[in-house]
Structure formats: C-alpha cells, structure tokens
Image (tube, rainbow, N blue to C red):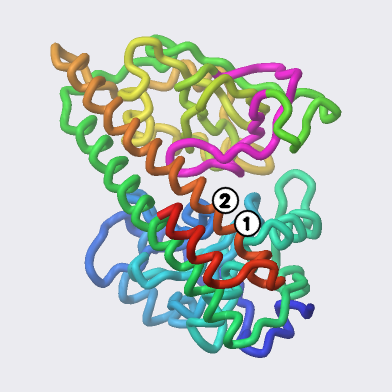
Amino acid sequence: MTTLNDVLTVRSIKTGPFGTQLRASEYTPFRTAEMHAVVSVGEIRSGVIAIEPRTPRVGKEVVERLPQYILDPRDVVVSRKGTVDRSSWVDPRFGRLFLGSDAIAVRFENELSARAYGYVLQARASREWLIRHASGSTMLSMNSEILGRLPVPILSNREMKAIVEVLGALDDKIAANQRLVTLILELGESMVQACDLAPTALAELATITMGTSPRGEYLNDDGIGIPFFQGVRDFGAVYPAKRIFTLHPARTAPDGAVLFAVRAPVGKTNLAVGDTAIGRGLASIASDSQPATLFFSMRAFETVWDEFQGGGTVFASINGSDVRSTMLPMPSGSETLRLEAKLSALLGRATIAERESETLANTRDELLPLLMSGKITVKDAEKQVEQEV
C-alpha cells in the first residue's frame, strides 16, 4: 500500500477555484457548444458525473483565463463538501467540463491510471476512510492534504488494464442509464413548463411534514428498519441511496413523496421509495392526486427557492411556514389527469434505470477488491459482468 500523493502517476491534487478567482456572476445557465459545465458537489455521483439542464456553465472568457481548471480524462473529481466520499473519473462522454469550487481534481499522467484509481476511490474502504478523516462537524469537508493521505494499493500497468477492462463494461451501462435518466428528467420538466400554469401555495397541493432526527442510538448501517436521510448527502438523480436505517423514526415520508432539502442546497429534490425516515435537513411533500406532476414542477421551477439560499446564519435554510406558503407554478386545466399519467410513466422508467445502475455499481464495488487481491480472475470477473449487462 501507499498513499494517493505517492502514486507515481499522480501529477497533482487540485482544489477548484475560490470566489476570488471565479465569481458566481460569471456562471451562466445557457448551453452552447463552447460552454464548459461546472462540476461541483451536485454533479458528482458515485462513479458518474451528472450534468443537468440547470448545471452552471462557464464561457470562453473564463476558460481562457483559468485553463488550469479544465477537466480531461486524466482526472478524477472528488466532492469537497458534504458528500466527501463521492468521486468519478472524468469520462470524455460527459462533455466539456470545468472544475468547480466545491470539487477537487486528482490529476494523473495518463488516462489508464485515472480510470483505475478512479475505481479505487469508489471502493468501500476508500469511501469510509474519506468520511472518517474529513474535517467539520456540521458539514463534512475535504481538502487536498487529507485526500493525498488516502491509503491506496500500488497497481501495475497489467493490473490497471485488467481493472479497467472488466469494470469499464459496467460503467458503460451505468453511463447509458444516467444519460437516459437525464433525458427523462429534462422531458418531464419541459412538459410541465409547456402547460398553462397556476401559481399555488404548496400547502394547497400536498401534505407537508418537516423532518426531525431520531436519537443517534436509534440509527444503524446494518439495514435494520426503514431508511433514514438527514439531508441531500445520499441523493441520486431520482431517489437517494440507502445507507443509514432506523427502527424508531421521528418523522416519515410516505412512498412516492418528494424529499425536499430545507437546508443548503435548499430546493433539491428526490423521491421516497417506501416509507422513509427524514431528519432536520429534509421535508416530505406528498401529493395524493398528482405526485409525478408535483415532482417535475418542483424541479422545473426550483428558482422559487432562490430567496432562501442565504437565509441561514451558517448556510442556507428555510422553515416550515415558508415551505407551506411558497407559490409553486403548477399545471392547470382539463389535461392535468392525462399529464399526470404521462409523467408517472416517465418517472417509472427513470426509476427502473436508476435501480439498475445501483445494482451495477454494487457489482462493480464487489468485484474491485477481488480483482486487486487476485481472489478472482479476470476471466471469472468478465463472466459475472456479462450476466449483469
């Protein structure tokens, strides 16, 4: 074993630009061929970079002024705040990318090393180490010094090629699913935005429950009880990954409810799959009649929460009264039932794709330590991958 800093093919570990170098006013929501999408916490998933329509972009002027933050396939990006255990290799299929302030880039000399050690960073042992050694009590924080001390194996070129060859097939399918989910979410939002809209208080549209955290001794990571989410740390594209559980929930969200972030980043959403315990960072927003329409409307009009992004003394937050009184544009008219059916079908397809990706990612994470330790041959691993994809 060695440390990430001492891997021979690591060129540098670079933190994204701070506010003095790149101002928020220089971001743009517009998408053109020359724009670079900014990769920060929200875009980094487990092994995937999720670029959505609302992902900020930077233009030619910024890129030419700060070329050191352009990302390429020799890089692995790591989340710097909150979800410090998330990382992804910079697959060229993700498009033109720019390192954001809430991310760190591990820069390698070649693409093979970046891909192979990208898998190492996603391994359970690496993720657990990053969480244990991150700084901060309110919100976990990562920096280049801590990341550089991460214990990693010394991999030969042959070992790296074997890892990439076997696990790359799984990642290809995960990436394809991610693109499908992104397209579905974009389509659903566009369908909502094209409707006749009526701004309506959220309390009139759904049952709203503000989260409360159960006592620490009631939480476990053994899968006992129902899943518990404190905030957005485990959010995916559609629903969160189950990591913490409880037998004694204080507040719950029903199956299909929107899980809504009431702390930074205010307004981020996911869906509850089954009864879900929610902590202080979330609210449950449940509609009996238009659950899919509500979900896509909250995504499409996320800007209604912008005024609350600086409402907390330490970081952004919103209280229950403001959640209930916020006016959300919602489709109205005679076609709402038909629209709900179409959006529900779209959401179902996105959920299937994300569940499949979760299964594939679990298989990838199980195979990686077996490949590195020699407990499974490349041929045997390939057979297992063929069964999955």
The three-letter code of the residue at mark 2 reads Asn
Report the residue at 51% width, 87% height from top: 110
Q: Determine which residue is flagged by label 2.
A: 362
Q: The residue under label 1 is which amino acid type?
A: Glu
Where does residue 332 sit, x and y in percent of width and height? 20, 16
Identity of the residue drawn at 85% across and 28% down: 217
In magenta, the rendered stretch is 226-253
**SS of the residue at dot 1?**
helix
- For residue 19, say whether it is visible: no
Q: Residue at x 31, y 23 (%)?
A: 293
Judge by depth and name the residue closer to the eye, 118 or 251: 118
Q: Which residue is mark 1?
A: 366
Using residue 234 as the reference point, say whether residue 25 is left or right of it.
left
Does residue 311 sit above or below 360 in this rendering? Answer: above
Foreground residue among 109 and 384: 384
Magenta-drawn stretch contains 196 = no
